[in-house]
Amino acid sequence: MSDLKEKVILVTGGTSGIGEACTELFARSGAKVVAMSIQDEQGKALAERLTGEDRQCIFQFGDVSKEQDVKAAVDLAVEKFGRLDAVHANAGVLRNQKITDITLEDFHLMLDVNLLGPVLLCKYAVPVMEEQGRGVICFTTSVAADIGFPEHAVYGASKAAVVSLMRSLTTDHSPNGVRFVAVSPGTIDTPMLAASCEGWDKPKEELYAEVAKKIPVQRMGQPIDVARTVAFLLSDDAGFIGGSVVHLEGGTLALPPW
Ligand SMILES: NC(=O)c1ccc[n+]([C@@H]2O[C@H](COP(=O)([O-])OP(=O)(O)OC[C@H]3O[C@@H](n4cnc5c(N)ncnc54)[C@H](O)[C@@H]3O)[C@@H](O)[C@H]2O)c1
């Protein structure tokens, strides 16, 4: 298992789906975790569960699109644990729509959470990491940044922007010790995916079985699949991986276009 012992890690969206699996895996690997999200009850319960196992986890309620909330989360990690080794910029939202139906409210929500959130995290985490002379920031993008998905136009654009952000940040800040990487999940079984199936004419289980059959490895991804990869990318073992996107999609991107 990747060595995260004693590492101080901030996970946004760290209380549900992929982020929850990351918070659990990192804390159970010996890291000191600050999990930030807008899910107060879920966050408190998660932190309680992990501290009950003698693991170190603090929940911080906060909206990644609000500058003061992001600064507070970074400050909390540093005040409580003395430094900030890693950030997983994972919080995200998806609103399925055709472009003809998009509301400005949903457009701004997706851009605010999926792009402004990572920008603000870097604004406050990078100076701390540069001062330390080391640190790593992992973004959760999506295969929707690479290939077209129905009703994902603005979501996919917001995730593609994060990949571009990561590459430029690598140019600017990796010479000062900060590494930037991204994971790009395909179809992962989380509450976000379940919500995006609402309104379809089939039950979720039937839809999931159909989707799984189309994925070369014949199953959907689970949050732990992503968490294990992020754990590796945040660890020192991945010290030479910079500016790269790791795809976790069971081979979907390798399929022929017919
Ligand atoms: N599930 C998939 O198939 C899939 C595929 C590709 C990428 N992703 C990406 O993975 C990430 C995690 O998604 P998930 O599937 O685990 O979804 P999820 O809905 O289970 O979790 C999303 C998390 O983000 C948090 N969040 C939402 N808005 C926030 C805000 N304004 N401030 C702080 N936190 C906020 C939520 O509270 C929650 O903890 C997202 O960035 C998503 O876009 C998911």
Image: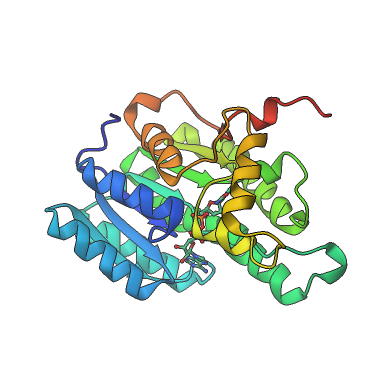
Question: What residue is shown at x 36% (from left), y 74% (from top)?
Answer: 40
Q: Is residue 111 visible?
A: yes
- Compare residues 172 and 69 and report the one nearer the observer: 69
- Compare residues 222 and 142 and report the one nearer the observer: 222
Question: What residue is shown at x 39% (from left), y 43% (from top)?
Answer: 130
Question: What residue is shown at x 60% (from left), y 41% (from top)?
Answer: 186
Query: Residue 127: x percent and y percent?
Result: 41, 51
- Compare residues 144 and 212 and report the one nearer the observer: 212
127 over 97 or under it: above or below = above
Report the side of 185 relative to 13 (left or right): right
Q: How many marks?
A: 0
Please state, as top left, top right, bottom left or bottom right, where the N terminus lies in the image.
top left
Examine the image and state in which quarter residue 42 appears: bottom left
144 over 95 or under it: above or below = above
Examine the image and state in which quarter residue 6 appears: top left
- Compare residues 138 and 54 and report the one nearer the observer: 54
Residue furthest right as drawn: 100
Question: What residue is shown at x 16% (from left), y 59% (from top)?
Answer: 51
Query: Residue 218: x percent and y percent?
Result: 58, 32
Query: Residue 239: x percent and y percent?
Result: 40, 26
Report the side of 35 relative to 169 (left or right): left
Q: Is residue 8 visible?
A: no
Please state, as top left, top right, bottom left or bottom right, where the C terminus lies in the image.
top right
Report the side of 57 relative to 63 (left or right): left
Query: Residue 38: x percent and y percent?
Result: 44, 71
Query: Looking at the image, what colour scheme do you see?
Result: rainbow
